[in-house]
Image (cartoon, helix red, strand yellow):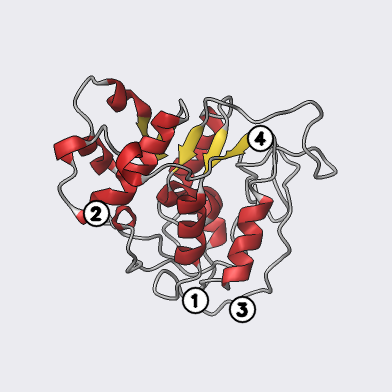
Amino acid sequence: MRRVPGCHQPPRAAHCGHEDHRYPGRRYVRAGEASGSAASAVARPDAVRPRAARPRCLDAGPGDRRRGGVPAPAGLAACDRRGRPPAGGRGCVSAVLLDTNLLIALLWPSHEQHETAIRWSTSARHRGRATCPFTQAGFVRIVSNPAFSRDAVRPQEAVEVLSANTTAPDHVFWPSDAPFAEVSRFVGPRLVGHQQVTDAYLLGLALRRGGKLATLDRRIAALTAPKSPEAQAWVIVA
């Protein structure tokens, strides 16, 4: 999986419109506190930031290691050793829609929940992954925002990283092709605040496509009734 290049400093809280990127008590990784690939991605304060590498598909599996000793996680894209999709592959119909917060955690090595996201990604490898215009635009907007990290990348770099991780047969793009009122009808009176609007649409889109929404935000549960069919359409990654 191609991750955001050159991110060495811990991201700071982003002041963005999508409220599910803010968590009570969130503390981002600091140098020397992380472990695994997240620790390797956090450089010393005096380290020189390298130039961003070109996006590419990793050819290593979950157990392999990339140059420099950083584990190569199972990501959004599955490619052979020439960077091509496996022959005969095709997108999955019943896929998991990656919420913006999960997409960022997967591709930003110093994110405090990066390792959690990677473990989930590896365990859920058998399912297809989906993105949509909302989650893709959210990823580009957040990681290119200087308020998110001192190592925020340029928007075009974020687009390239996103493209490198969404060109595989196990990824499917879900267009936002239905009105909000129609997609979010299932929520009803549970839609009580502006912070729920995007979540309601994403969950409704997953329901419409016969898939699920994977997110880091536990507040998604407030949109569905317990034990309802809609409550089976979201997954909390923790």
Task: Report which residue position mark 2 lands on.
Answer: 195
Q: Residue flagged by tag 4: what amino acid is it?
A: Gly
Q: Residue flagged by tag 3: what amino acid is it?
A: Val
Whole-angstrom CA distance, mark 1 to mark 3, is 9 Å
Task: Report which residue position mark 1 lands on.
Answer: 45
Q: Who comes first in sequence, dot 2 or dot 1?
A: 1
Q: Who comes first in sequence, dot 4 or dot 1?
A: 1
Q: Residue flagged by tag 2: what amino acid is it?
A: Gln
Crowding around mark 1 (Cα neighbors within 10 Å: few <14, some 14 to 19, many 20+) is few
Which label is found at residue 63? 4
Whole-angstrom CA distance, mark 3 to mark 2, is 38 Å
> Do tag 4 and tag 3 residues touch (Cβ < 8 Å)?
no
**Can residue 84 be seen here?**
yes
Q: Who comes first in sequence, dot 2 or dot 4?
A: 4
Whole-angstrom CA distance, mark 4 to mark 3, is 29 Å
Q: Taking 200 as reference, is 43 above or below it?
A: below
> Do tag 3 and tag 2 residues touch (Cβ < 8 Å)?
no
Image coords of residue 222 (percent x, y): 20, 38
Mark 4 secondary-structure assignment: loop
Q: Residue flagged by tag 1: what amino acid is it?
A: Pro
Image coords of residue 231 (percent x, y): 28, 26
Mark 1 secondary-structure assignment: loop
Crowding around mark 2 (Cα neighbors within 10 Å: few <14, some 14 to 19, many 20+) is some
Depth order, front residue of 29/232: 232
